[in-house]
Structure formats: C-alpha cells, structure tokens
Amino acid sequence: MPTIISHGLAGATLSRLASAGSAAASRTDGLKVLLLCAAAAMLPDLDVVTFKLGIPYASPWGHRGVSHSLLLALLAALLLAACSRGVWQRLGWSLHSACLLLFAVIASHAGLDMLTDATHGPALFMPFDMQRYLLPWRPIEGAPISPRLWLTAKGWRVVYTELLYVWLPCLMLWVLRVRFERCKEPA
C-alpha cells in the first residue's frame, strides 16, 4: 500500500483541484475541507486493526477487503458530507457535489492501492463481488506494515516509488492549479 501520508496527499490534491478551497470561501473553511479530504482518503486503512484481531489478509473483512470497496466509499462520503454540511454550504457547494468529491477522494485510496506490487488488491465491488483487483502496471512498492522494516532497503524503495508516482504528480497538479488561479485573477 502507499503510505497513509501519500493517501492523504492524494485526497488533499483532489480537494484542491475541485476548488473546494476557492478564493470565495474563507481560508478556514477551505482548510477544513482540505484536511477533511486528506483524512477521508486515509479512512480505508483503518482496517489494519484486523491484523491485530487475527483476521487474515485475504478475508473479506481483512486488509483491503470491504473497507476498500466502492460501496463503503459511497456510504462514508454520504456520512462525511452530511456531518460537514455547514462547511460545504458556506463554500457554496451542494451536498450532492460534496458527496461526489468525498467519494472520489475515498475511492482514490483503492486506486492507489491497485498500483502497488501487492499480492492482494482492493475488493472494489464487495459485497457483490469478492474478487480483489490490481492493475497490470504496478510501479509502487508496497509499504511494509511493520515500522521496523522502514529502515531497510524495501522501506527506501517504498519512499522512492511514492515520491516518483504519487508525490511528484501531486506536486505538479498543485503547481498547475496555482498557475491556473493566477491566470484567472483580474489584471
């Protein structure tokens, strides 16, 4: 899996690209949405507690199981949008639009996980389909769950591949977004 921080960066980037922190909004509300989207992108990995509970990785309830499904992404998006309704309203967003953004942010987690060299991909269509999905091109090194493995060669490969395939593209999108905003400013 990409590290939890990389998932958060992807969520924040999607939020920024959607103009959730637009100039019309207060900086505080824009920041709240940015942080909400970053946290929402990390949500599916709460399932790592299943390792401590003895639930096998390949189980529907294990890591990358039901918590990484599109159905759960939709349910979580509905709940998060409803709970943060006031912020979205102050930004001029409909609840429907907020829900769509949050769904995309949460689903981006599974999308990134499908780019890893893992043996088990996310169960995108659970509970209707138990299959786990990985993409044919998987350039991101799977992150070790154990912190002690971060100081090994594998840990450094994870950092390198995430910088190259997640952080660099996100940085480029942020730069393009800033340039776009500057082009829109009145002269």
Image (cartoon, rainbow, N blue to C red):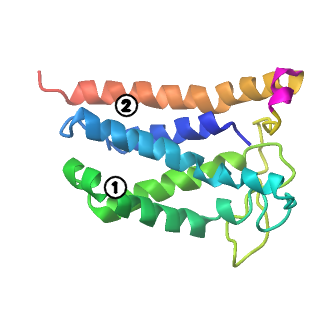
Where 82 falls versus 29 (above or below)? below
Specify start and end residues of the magenta stretch as a single range. 147-152
> So how many labels did they put on this image?
2
Q: Compare marks 2 and 1 and give the one earlier in the sequence.
A: 1
Comparing 139 with 91, the one in front is 91
* Image location of residue 31, percent across then percent down: 34, 36
Residue 152 relative to residue 4: left or right: right
Do labels 2 and 1 touch, CB within 8 Å? no
Name the image quarter holding the N terminus: top right
Amino acid type indicated by mark 1: Ser
Comparing 93 with 172, the one in front is 93
In this orientation, does residue 102 appear?
Answer: yes
Q: What secondary structure do most residues of the magenta stretch adopt?
A: helix
Q: Which residue is mark 1?
A: 84
In this orientation, does residue 110 appear?
Answer: no
Q: Which residue is mark 2?
A: 177
Residue at the image position 40 percent from the left and 28 percent from the top: 176
Describe the element under mark 1 as helix, strand or loop. loop
Residue at the image position 67 percent from the left and 70 percent from the top: 125
Quick check: is 112 in the magenta stretch? no
Residue at the image position 36 percent from the left and 45 percent from the top: 18
Q: Residue furthest left?
A: 187
Residue at the image position 34 percent from the left and 55 percent from the top: 84
Amino acid type indicated by mark 2: Arg
* Image location of residue 66, percent across then percent down: 69, 66
